[in-house]
Amino acid sequence: MKIIHCPLNGPRNAQEFVHGGEVVAMPDPHRSSDAEWASFVFLENNVAGVVREWWCHVPTAYWFIAERDTVRDEFIRTYDASELFRERVEFTRPAAPKGDAPNGQGA
Amino acid sequence: MAFGLIKYGLSPSYPGKRFLSRQPELKSSYDVVIIGGGGHGLACAYYLAKNHGVKNVAVLEKGYIGGGNTGRNTAIIRSNYLTPEGVAFYDESVRLFQGLSEDLDFNILYTERGHFTLAHTDAAMRTSRWRAEVNKHLGVNSEVVDREDLRKLVPCMNLSEDVRHPVLGALYHPPGSIARHDAVAWGYAGRAAELGVEIHQGTEVTGLEIEGGRITGVVTNRGHVGCGKAMQAVAGLSGVMAAKAGFKLPIRTVPLQACVSMPLKPFLDPIIVSGSLHIYISQGSRGELVMGGSTDPYPRYQTRSTLDFMEGLMAHILELFPFLADVPVLRQWAGMTDMTPDFSPVMGETPVKNYYIDSGWGTWGFKATPVCGKRMAETIATARVPELLQPFRLSRFEEYHLVGEKGAASVGH
């Protein structure tokens, strides 16, 4: 059984974790084009080597970040997401300046 | 055959022709370079030469032909998918497979076994009916059977209600088949080589040459090769090759494991699959039970076997076939699959002109070998993507026009 070091719970069995995909910057959902958004949602870097990913310890619903080698199948480092994300992400739609309707989608 | 065996068994020289002639030196350029000498790449080369007269073709393979995922799948062939696009595509493949031994003059040991997708829940029964209706509408032979039918059709299977996931019924697909997967690669390679295609093994493509958004050549460990057109058919490493071409794919590389038991006397004629339990099992022509499951839980570029997989798989297999408990497993292995978000392949044109892609082969690649080879050859030769491949274009993702194929092997219902 593979052991993953959870920053919150210590070393735990790999079966307790789920993989959440690569850490990538989210484009502004209100201003990105359809193609940019599709790229964010669907396209993968799928790197053969060291990647930075979201992982979740399911029993405690705790999301954290892992640096992992996808060729050697080794976890290099795991740490709390606060190391990378220091500001709250706001999802409320900002008031658009007059005449600016991104993507023609309207409100 | 038998006489020849005795005659030449005693003779110091064997006059039989070599399957592939000696590997030639790389030419400075080819009309078409195919990256990847698995079933798909070799099939494409064969159909380019045979159907379109394009014979100045090189297949570049970094290892040996059919040594990647072509030889690592569980060799199941079927067309009972869920989406009309998928059913039409895989149906053409099954039809090509049926005549392939004759077409290639090489026995691929194609045997029609019948294919059962078990349903353990009402939701799975509903999906079975849905798939059966889509299949019938497109002329594919599929029907829903209940537990009483299964008792007659698969007498060796445990249909007791006294298990964790009792079987309610199944989607029965009589044309479901198995074949020798490496024979498919060798058959295509042999015939393609006879038609003038060059097959270069031990030739790794390390870079692509792109000028003005158009492919002009590839860099290999044996030097530079110019090309008019190129296609990558390197499922498992599609993302790595696409990165060399400068674009991203909607693909994660995830290992898929399988195993075989020791050979047993024939007792299991049909192929048994359960999407809910994530298992498939069939008895190959050597008597070995070929067993597989779902993809590994996270992406990796690695083909290591795990105990987790074996434990999970066997827990479910033994529920269906309890008498296999004492049968030893002979081999376990893994392949690297191209998993797409919609469980459909990615084929056709790319952002690079004259550079074509054949990728996104998750758990459904082997069964698509002939149709993909034939239709990709058509795409390359005519520079026009046939209607059959249109739904699987790379650009479907930025158009938000996915092909949600829930009939794929790794999908529960």
Image (spheres, rainbow, N blue to C red):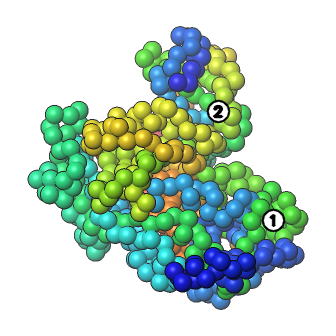
**Residue type indicated by callout 2:** Asp
Left or right side of B135 for B201: right
**Residue type indicated by callout 1:** Val
How far from the left and from the top, in percent, is residue B44?
61, 74
Is the residue at mark 1 from the same chain as the one at mark 2? no
How far from the left and from the top, in percent, is residue B196?
71, 84
Say which mark, if any, is on residue B378: none
Binning the other alpha carbons within 10 Å of mark 2 as few (below 14), some (14 to 19) or many (20 upward) gives: some
* Residue linked to disc 1: B218
* Residue linked to disc 2: A73
| Label 1 chain ID | B
Q: Look at 69% across and 80% down and name the residue there.
A: B11
Give whichever of A91, B111 is nearer the camera: B111
Q: Look at 23% across and 37% down and name the residue there.
A: B165
In this picture, is B261 found above or below B47? above
| Label 2 chain ID | A
| Label 1 to label 2: alpha-carbon separation | 30 Å
How far from the left and from the top, in percent, is residue B396?
52, 59
Q: Is residue B131 visible?
A: no
Q: Determine the residue located farthest toward the top in the rendered image.
A: A9
Q: Residue B140 falls in which quadrant of the image?
A: bottom left
Q: Residue B95 falls in which quadrant of the image?
A: bottom left
Q: Are marks 1 and 2 in contact (CB under 8 Å)?
A: no
In this picture, is B192 found above or below B80? below
Q: Look at 60% across and 16% down and name the residue there.
A: A5
In this picture, is B39 found above or below B24? above
